[in-house]
Image (cartoon, rainbow, N blue to C red):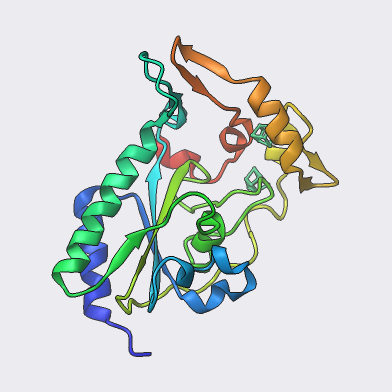
Amino acid sequence: MEKDEKLTTSIKKYCKKLGVDVVGFADPKFFDRFPEYNRPQAYLKGCKTVIVVGFHLYDLTLDAWSKPILGEDKSYQFADSIIENFCNKIISFLKKRGHVSAIITYSPGLFLKDASALAGIGPIGKNNLLITPTYGSQVRLRAIVTTAPLVCGKPILESEYCKSCNKCIEACPSSAFVDGKYMKHICYNYSTSNKKKLSDHTVIWCNACIEACPVGKNNDK
Ligand code: SF4
Ligand code: SF4
């Protein structure tokens, strides 16, 4: 399939202008290893590229969840609102150039950290999260599927950063890493019963493993 280099450059420039911190492009063919409902084609027929967009959580309180005072059932996530706005703008940008695109829902959706690694943004670390060279794991992610044939990144399948590091494992208050392997149920049980209250309506989940990761930390200063 012929790739549109000019459009790829334009999108990157447009993302920079919008204030998007991380952007990458993944080839849908790499998603065949996942169940059908976690593949890009399940969300857009004729999908040629998965665009991964990341927002830097420069302060981890940006990862907080808020419940409205009037008791609606829905919770709001500050970083999600920002990133959704970015995605809608990118979709309009592509629409003006004749391409159909859609934001991927969170559930079932795509595996966002895998999509990011497949886009060449960074590896998945021992902390079971995406590690970006600039921001470590302090990023909130979202994906768009599009018919635009963009130039895709090279998948990154191993984490160079983690070879001689165990900081996330050592920092975990729930010992959620068993023999170095992340155990989702242990993390989830701990995180749901130890939410930190930032205000009457706002909570933040455990992120000790994100905070402990040294990658990108010097860039915050
Ligand atoms: S989020 Fe908290 S509980 Fe879960 S793995 Fe990270 S440090 Fe451990
Ligand atoms: S803290 Fe160390 S081992 Fe854990 S994800 Fe970051 S670089 Fe990898």
- Of 164 and 25, which appears nearest the observer? 25
Task: Answer with the quarter of the image where residue 37 lies.
Answer: bottom right
Q: From what the image shows, is residue 96 above or below residue 65? A: below
- Of 107 and 214, which appears nearest the observer? 107
Q: Is residue 62 left or right of residue 212?
A: left
Q: From what the image shows, is residue 44 above or below residue 131? A: below
Q: Residue furthest right?
A: 179
- Residue depicted at x 85% and y 46%: 179
Q: How many marks?
A: 0
- Quarter of the image with the N terminus is bottom left
Q: Is residue 147 left or right of residue 121?
A: left
Residue 175 point in image, percent of width and height = 79, 33
Q: Residue furthest top?
A: 200
Q: Residue furthest left?
A: 96
- Quarter of the image with the C terminus is top left
- Of 90 and 8, which appears nearest the observer? 90
Task: Answer with the quarter of the image where residue 205 lies.
Answer: top right
Inspect this view and state whether residue 172 appears.
no
Task: Answer with the quarter of the image where residue 152 lies.
Answer: bottom left
Residue 202 point in image, percent of width and height = 45, 18
Residue 169 point in image, percent of width and height = 73, 38
- Residue depicted at x 44% and y 25%: 73
Residue 63 point in image, percent of width and height = 45, 32
Inspect this view and state whether residue 92 appears.
yes
- Residue depicted at x 74% and y 38%: 185
- Residue depicted at x 52% and y 24%: 204
